[in-house]
């Protein structure tokens, strides 16, 4: 019976070593792979900015609208540079800023409508009081 002390020369050990090398390389490649392009997030963010502008965000929440547009522009620039993580983060921030602008615009419009309604009620009360005297 012949035994060898050199385990590296065994075909089974070489196969195991090769398999481990392939597995390790595959793991490293997967870990280093960049994130996919956030095209869906970019579209959602663009739609949020458009919706906020349509709701009156430009007039009623100009700072938030400006911030949302700037972040969306920076996200587009990051996309062209294939910096997808930065693009995704900026697009998400732009979406939130646009949603805030839209909420402020809708809130402002509702407040204005409530004020107008209160003024109408006040005028009607005055009119009613004048007629009852």
Image (cartoon, rainbow, N blue to C red):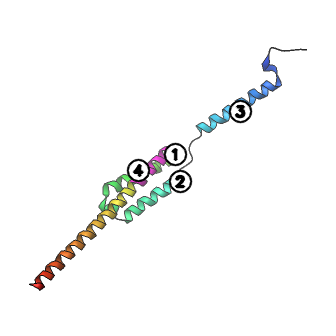
Please state if 77 lies on the left or on the right of 24 as rendered: left
Give the x, y percent position of residue 72: 43, 52
Q: Specify the label residue 39 is tagged with.
A: 2
Residue at the location (24% across, 73% down)?
117
Q: Specify the label residue 22 is tagged with.
A: 3
Residue 128 within the magenta-colored segment of the rendering: no
Query: Disc 3 or 2, which lies upstream in sequence?
Result: 3
Boundaries of the magenta span = 85-96
| Disc 2 secondary structure class | helix
Q: Is residue 14 above or below residue 64?
A: above
Q: Residue furthest front?
A: 132
User: Where's the C terminus, which quadrant?
Assistant: bottom left
Q: Is residue 83 visible?
A: no
Q: Residues within 10 Å of mark 2 (few under 14, many from 20)?
A: some
* Magenta highlight: main SS: helix
| Disc 1 secondary structure class | helix
Between marks 3 and 2 in the image, the one whose residue lies nearer the viewer: 3
Answer yes or no: do the residues labelled 3 and 1 have beta carbons within 8 Å? no
Residue ID for mark 1: 84
Relative depth, front residue between 52 and 3: 3
For the residues marked 4 and 1, what is the alpha-carbon distance in whole angstroms?
14 Å
Residue at the location (89% across, 14% down)?
2
Between marks 3 and 4 in the image, the one whose residue lies nearer the viewer: 3
Give the x, y percent position of residue 71: 41, 50
User: Where's the N terminus, which quadrant?
Assistant: top right
Residue at the location (53% across, 55% down)?
40
| Disc 3 secondary structure class | helix
Q: Residues within 10 Å of mark 4 (few under 14, many from 20)?
A: many
Residue ID for mark 4: 71
Q: Quadrant of residue 99?
A: bottom left
For the residues marked 1 and 2, what is the alpha-carbon distance in whole angstroms?
9 Å
């Amino acid at each position: 019976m012949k035994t060898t002390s050199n385990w590296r020369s065994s075909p089974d050990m070489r196969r195991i070593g090769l398999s481990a090398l392939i597995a390790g390389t595959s793991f490293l490649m997967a870990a280093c792979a960049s994130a996919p392009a956030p095209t869906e997030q970019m579209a959602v963010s663009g739609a949020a900015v458009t919706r906020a502008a349509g709701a009156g965000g430009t007039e009623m929440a100009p700072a938030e609208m400006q911030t949302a547009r700037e972040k969306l522009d920076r996200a587009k620039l990051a996309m062209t540079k294939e910096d997808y993580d930065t693009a995704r983060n900026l697009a998400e921030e732009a979406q939130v800023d646009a949603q805030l602008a839209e909420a402020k615009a809708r809130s402002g419009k509702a407040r204005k409508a409530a004020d107008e309604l209160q003024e109408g009620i006040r005028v009607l009360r005055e009119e009613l009081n004048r007629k009852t005297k």
